[in-house]
């Protein structure tokens, strides 16, 4: 093994920054491939243990990472989904064709009631994406009423007829999805007008207050952010805006553009591809800052939130699987992508209020894979990053710097810092997240914690012999957390991170 590089992490515990909204650890479940059917939902007659058709093992695993919210039904599927098709007796629900993902038949057995049943089992807030692309204002308005209105109204009566007496709570409501593409092929000005119109008729019923999210840019296309912020500004120039969106979104995937449209293999990649991907992942910080800068021009008080409601890696599908199902394996490389994203999310939590990884089960950078033949469940390396970072939920980020770090790399034309970190404090505990992105060299990290006394240090490590390692039915724990020794040091403490690894270190904090 190579001799370690050394870095010093300075954590100013007395310099609080923004609160890390737990919703930055949100998730996404689309009617795509085996995410819903065979992932979350197996039906009540399945041999796989379930409650009202919803897989018990998947629910249990996601509760352990305290999933804060779940976005549904899409994605591109949202803009061809008509919610009335997914209510009432399942045998009577009309079937449709999922034209976006595989051109296969959708039986609508998993609909509004099943989704909210799932959210209640998970203890997660609902993030519903409404249909702008092929729907109507009336359809979306009725859906909000159906879900959230108590008392006597047409949609509330319909909900009761379908077996649900009390309304549900919906904190988050999406006004369409990717309007620049599968959501309608609109330009920014056209969609901004549509978003304002739809948001107006997505009403607050009773004590349910919607946080309406306008669908925004791909990557750093700030034209969308500018148009959406201008629409709010113009509407509110004479008085405070009412029934208008409170947030706007963007999407950012970490992928490689290979020859002939290929995205590359999830498990078979070389050093150059690895570092190019890490630089793409780390660049999300610049993209967030770009959108923040535009939003700050129109909203210096930061009342409007930024939402990254699709992010993650995107590879070629696994050999032998349906090309429209987006099923990919998940290696330690994917876990490091997640770790780097979270460090950037924590840094920008003053404006970024929610993020949703794509997707929770069996699609893209999933938390969970289920074996199609045996039905067995596998936790991915990315799942473990979410679990290890759970202590950051609703914690206060504290100012963190890495000094004397290894020299940055240049990969795919972007600068890559090979050491990444963030820290937060909550309830008398400090959690520090650390990544060593170097493929070959260990990294010794010395803690220099200022503004507070710390004690009772403990560490956890996510590592493997190679960055290609992944979990499977035959090797469920090939990549799983292990204890990490925290050693004394004159500055306070130190740890040694192996190459290509992620770690968390916890301290008890004393003012």
Image (cartoon, grey):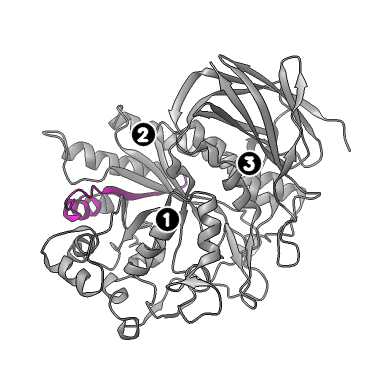
Query: Which of the 4 image quarters holds residue 372?
Result: bottom right
Q: SS class of the residue under badge 3?
A: helix
Is mark 1 in CB contact (under 8 Å) with mark 3?
A: no
Asked if residue 45 is among those painted magenta in the image, a careful observer would answer no
Q: Using the image, tell me which numbered label, if any, was put on residue 279.
A: 3
**Disc 2 crowd, CA 10 A, few/some/many (<14, 14-19, 20+):** some
Name the residue that disc number 1 marks. Answer: 70
Circle 1 SS class: strand
Tell me, for residue 294, which label it has, or none. Answer: 2
Residue 101 on image: x %, y %: 47, 72
Q: Position of residue 205 (x, y in %)?
A: 17, 53
Q: Residue at x 32, y 83 (%)?
A: 94
The residue at 38%/57% (across/down) is 178
Q: Which segment is the magenta one?
A: 194-220
Q: Residue furthest right?
A: 1
Q: Earlier in the sequence, mark 3 or mark 2?
A: 3
């Amino acid at each position: 093994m190579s001799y370690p590089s050394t870095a010093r992490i300075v954590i100013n515990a007395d310099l609080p920054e923004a609160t890390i909204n737990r919703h930055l650890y949100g998730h996404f479940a689309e009617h795509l491939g085996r995410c819903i059917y065979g992932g979350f939902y197996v039906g009540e007659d399945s041999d796989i243990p379930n409650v009202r058709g919803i897989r018990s093992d998947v629910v249990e695993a996601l509760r352990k990472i305290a999933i804060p919210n779940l976005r549904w039904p899409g994605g591109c599927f949202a803009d061809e989904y008509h919610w009335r098709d997914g209510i009432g007796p399942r045998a009577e629900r009309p079937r449709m064709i999922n034209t976006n993902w595989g051109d296969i038949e959708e039986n609508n057995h998993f609909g509004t009631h099943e989704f909210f049943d799932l959210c209640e089992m998970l203890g997660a807030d609902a993030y519903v994406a409404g249909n702008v692309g092929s729907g109507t204002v009336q359809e979306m308005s009725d859906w909000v009423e159906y879900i959230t209105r108590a008392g006597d109204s047409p949609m509330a009566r319909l909900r009761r007829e379908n077996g649900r007496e009390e309304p549900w709570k919906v904190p988050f409501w999406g006004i369409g999805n990717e309007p620049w593409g599968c959501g309608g092929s609109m330009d920014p000005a056209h969609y901004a007008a549509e978003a304002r119109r739809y948001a107006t008729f997505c009403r607050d019923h009773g004590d349910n207050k919607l946080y309406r999210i306008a669908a925004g840019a791909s990557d750093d296309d700030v034209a969308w952010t500018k148009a959406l912020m201008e629409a709010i500004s113009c509407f509110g120039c004479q008085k405070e805006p009412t029934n208008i969106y409170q947030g706007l979104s963007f999407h950012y995937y970490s992928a490689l553009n290979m020859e002939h449209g290929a995205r590359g293999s999830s498990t078979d990649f070389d050093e150059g591809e690895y570092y190019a991907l890490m630089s793409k992942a780390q660049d999300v910080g610049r993209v967030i800052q770009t959108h923040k800068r535009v939003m700050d021009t129109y909203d210096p008080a930061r009342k409007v939130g930024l939402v990254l409601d699709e992010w993650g890696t995107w590879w070629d599908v696994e050999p032998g699987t349906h090309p429209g199902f987006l099923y990919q394996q998940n290696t330690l490389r994917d876990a490091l992508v997640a770790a780097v994203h979270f460090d950037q999310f924590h840094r920008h939590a003053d404006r970024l209020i929610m993020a949703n990884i794509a997707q929770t089960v069996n699609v893209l950078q999933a938390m969970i894979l289920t074996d199609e033949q045996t039905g067995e469940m596998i936790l991915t390396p990315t799942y473990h990053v979410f679990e290890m970072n759970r202590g950051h939920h609703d914690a206060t980020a504290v100012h963190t710097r890495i000094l004397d770090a290894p020299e940055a790399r240049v990969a795919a034309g972007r600068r890559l810092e090979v050491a990444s970190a963030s820290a937060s404090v909550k309830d008398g505990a400090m959690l520090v997240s650390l990544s060593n992105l170097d493929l070959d060299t260990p990294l010794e990290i010395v803690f220099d914690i200022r503004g507070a006394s710390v004690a009772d240090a403990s560490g956890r490590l996510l590592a493997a012999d190679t960055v290609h390692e992944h979990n499977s039915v035959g090797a469920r724990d090939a990549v799983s957390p292990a204890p990490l020794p925290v050693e004394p040091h004159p500055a306070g403490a130190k740890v040694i991170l192996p190459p290509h690894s992620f770690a968390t270190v916890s301290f008890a904090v004393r003012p």
